[in-house]
Amino acid sequence: KAGVTQTPRYLIKTRGQQVTLSCSPISGHRSVSWYQQTPGQGLQFLFEYFSETQRNKGNFPGRFSGRQFSNSRSEMNVSTLELGDSALYLCASSLRLSGGISSSYNEQFFGPGTRLTVL
Amino acid sequence: EDKVVQSPLSLVVHEGDTVTLNCSYEVTNFRSLLWYKQEKKAPTFLFMLTSSGIEKKSGRLSSILDKKELFSILNITATQTGDSAVYLCAVTPGGSEKLVFGKGTKLTVNP
């Protein structure tokens, strides 16, 4: 079974530009979560999508947005890029079965990430 | 605020040593604790623990959770150079699918 794939793997942008990152989950996985990883803050949760709806959101400004398509693929967009947005952006998929709150939890499997550099 | 603290932040050992990595947490309505290994890019899943006192084992790696004391340990026996990586601990709070990560423990295994 193919793992989580992310494109592009590397990206260089300048301040003020916008960027779109793509994530394809493991086949059959309907939940996609996005994380930002920096040396100072570590891995921080951005948002989670399930059935084309954003279910959870982390503490990031509105410049960070995302969406999910009917085939579960997800995109993340960052507008008006700042130097501090330079980071590794990781996407993870899981076998979440419903949109409601569940007492059980399915482990998340991560993609290789997109390394974004903002100059 | 949900919080995960890992210790030590870094560790250097020799091949064959046994190491113990620590993870303590404070989280609202705890559901599960997960351990990941991150070498170059993607964190790879190691264990998920939901019940207290039950040990999960995979080869030389094992982990146990103490829900009363709010911590977990990851043990690696007979370390090899291929175990060199950052080990991440994460918890899932109730009502959310997000993972709250610790800063990780960087393990270096020298030959």
Image (cartoon, grey):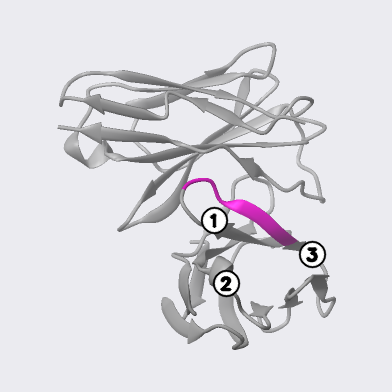
- Which residues fall within the magenta stretch? B41-47
Mark 2 lies on residue: B25
* Callout 3 amino acid: Thr
User: Which of the chains bears the disc numbered 2?
Assistant: B
Query: x and y percent of residue B104 in the render?
Result: 47, 66
Q: CA distance from mark 1 to mark 3?
A: 15 Å
Q: Quadrant of the C terminus of chain A?
A: top left
Q: In this view of the protein, which residue sits in the foreground, B33 or A54?
A: B33
Residue B8 is covered by the magenta coloring = no
Residue A41 sits above or below residue B20 on the image: above
Q: Position of residue B71 (x, y in %)?
A: 64, 78
Q: Which residue is mark 1?
A: B100
Q: Which residue is mark 3?
A: B50
Residue A58 on image: x %, y % = 47, 42
In front here: A78 or B77?
B77
- Reply above or below: B35 against A99: below
